[in-house]
Image (cartoon, rainbow, N blue to C red):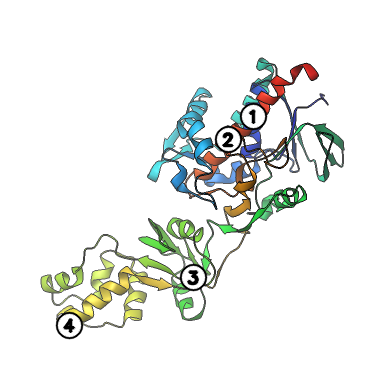
Amino acid sequence: MNDNFDTIILGAGAAGLMCAARAGQKGARALVLEKSEKPGKKILISGGGRCNFTNIGAGPNNYLSSNPHFAKSALARYTPRDFLDLVESHGIAWHEKTLGQLFCDGSAKQIVEMLLSECARSNEFGGDVEIRCGEEIASVVHSNGTYTVTTQNGAYSAPALVIATGGPSIPKMGATGFAYELARQFGMKVVEPRPALVPLTLGGEEVLFREISGVSAPVVATANKSSFAEAALFTHKGLSGPAILQVSSYWRPGDPITIDFMPDRTEGWLVEAKQANPRATLKSVLREALPDRLAEILVDKIGLQGELGNLSDKALRSAETRLSRWTFTPNGSEGFAKAEVTVGGISTAELSSKTMESRKNPGLYAIGEAVDVTGWLGGYNFQWAWASGVAAGEAIGAMACSGAELR
């Protein structure tokens, strides 16, 4: 057991393990402290157990942050292709789903095993990575250029400390706001965290849509000028599905969201349907594109009954507009318990975009979900974890090598 460390990394998730592996392979001696009994717990449940480990099209425009430019440096220096090369070097079979999402053919366990293997390879480069699970952090202090972390098992010290404990999303996995508490302890600002990639709830008259729980349809959902063309799912609490999860990151309480239920139809399509078949009904036309139960509830809400030939063109155009700009006003979300990630976190103004190091506290780094950088659904958040982990790991490795003679 080595007690002479260059860095202590708090959290053995995606970002923490990647940071440890890169630092170790740059010659640093890293200690990873994880409170769970095993590393990579959130990786294991991701992508339905197959881990949507990156998105081939990931770029700065796929992320939310108070500073939209912050993620550019790390993402440019460690790309989806770089991570895919690593996956392939370990012989992990993968496949691409829609919209550039990459998954393991087998199990998410393969990604965790790969990261642990990369940590173990540090010995080949003169570094060392030690991972200790079941470590509950009692305190963190900084004195005379050294960070000391105390757990129930003892005290550990190093000149560098990495906050990689994530955000409060999915608390049943052990997630907490510890990263923010630690950041504030060291005088760093935190952008108010809120649930992201989370189902939205409906109340009032919109409760009626709960009756079609389990029904989904391809739509374009929009919140605060951000739109996503994917499936929406009605649930017993409200709205979910990829399109809703995506816009939830942009939605704020009290805001409406709009849904285009007929995104592939051009203006005037209902009038054309009337001309083509005057005896058709709005319900029969909608059933050609939407599930029956959804078509029925939309027609009931619109209130246009009878054959299209008996309805005015004006009424049909009004129905078109309603169907393309259907407005819901969610009364909330399902919160951090069901959120896949967190919007907000440690302010990017506090960090170097190149190294992830605190501007106020030399040797203190923050990476992954703990930082105010949040990706879209579809592998983007993992890519941020890899890229930010590499950025910090390389910086720590460089620091360790420059001070190697002091060890």
Numbered badge on residue 312: 4
Q: Could you tell me how far apart the alpha carbons at marks 2 and 1 are, in whole angstroms?
A: 9 Å
Foreground label between 3 and 2: 2
Q: Are marks 2 and 1 in contact (CB under 8 Å)?
A: yes
| Type of amino acid under label 1 | Ala
* Picture quadrant where residue 145 is located: top right
**Secondary structure under badge 4?**
loop
| Type of amino acid under label 4 | Ser
Q: Could you tell me how far apart the alpha carbons at marks 3 and 1 are, in whole angstroms?
A: 41 Å
Find disc 2 in the rendering and name its residue.
354
- Residue 166: percent from left, percent from top: 65, 47
Residue 405 in view here: yes
Find disc 1 in the rendering and name its residue.
395
* Picture quadrant where residue 132 is located: top right
Q: Earlier in the sequence, mark 1 or mark 4?
A: 4
Numbered badge on residue 255: 3
Give the quadrant of the N terminus: top right
| Type of amino acid under label 3 | Asp
Q: Could you tell me how far apart the alpha carbons at marks 1 and 4 are, in whole angstroms?
A: 68 Å
Q: Quick check: 405 left or right of 175?
A: right
Q: Quick check: 262 left or right of 222?
A: left
Foreground label between 3 and 4: 3
Residue 379 position (above or below residue 266): above
